[in-house]
Image (cartoon, rainbow, N blue to C red):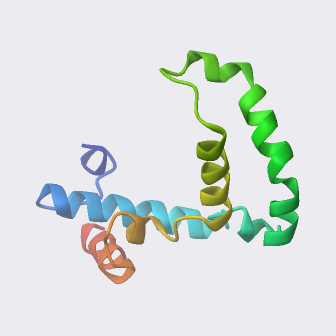
Amino acid sequence: MTADLLALGGDTVDGKVRSLIGAVEELLDRLHIPRSVADLGITEEEFRTAMPELVKAAFDDPSWRSNPRMPLLAELEELFWSAWRGRGDLARAAGVPHEASAQAHKEGS
């Protein structure tokens, strides 16, 4: 498991996952990596205005041809909105409270 390779600690799979999530969160914070398109300073109105062009460009991109199926335009739009909103921190996205992921990481250090 990755947490073992990075010596992050954790006695159970759940503990190791929590340690890994905490380490990734810490790295993202230290590197000041934005977690969403909105965090880049792009307003919802700007994004909404650009959406038709974004969806068209994504749909026309030839790399989709290597996917098992072509996405629907509505799916592409939702994917873009998900990127604009972000998922919060990784711990929340994985159902782990941030305090628990940070604590698990500290315990593994």
User: Residue 51, image x and y in percent?
Assistant: 80, 52
Q: Quadrant of residue 82?
A: bottom right
Residue 108 visible? The answer is yes
Q: Quadrant of residue 84?
A: bottom right
Q: Residue furthest bottom?
A: 99
Residue at position x 82%, y 47% from top? 52
Q: Is residue 45 left or right of residue 15?
A: right
Pick the front one: 82 or 14:
82
Q: Is residue 3 left or right of residue 74?
A: left
Q: Quadrant of residue 1?
A: top left
Q: Is residue 85 left or right of residue 12?
A: right
Residue at position x 39%, y 78% from top? 98
User: Residue 107, image x and y in percent?
Assistant: 25, 74
Q: Is residue 76 above or below residue 21?
A: above
Pick the front one: 19 or 75:
75
Label total for image = 0
User: Residue 90, image x and y in percent?
Assistant: 44, 64
Which quarter of the figure is the C terminus placed in?
bottom left
Residue at position x 30%, y 58% from top? 8
Pick the front one: 73 or 65:
73
Residue at position x 18%, y 61% from top? 14
Residue 43 visible? The answer is no
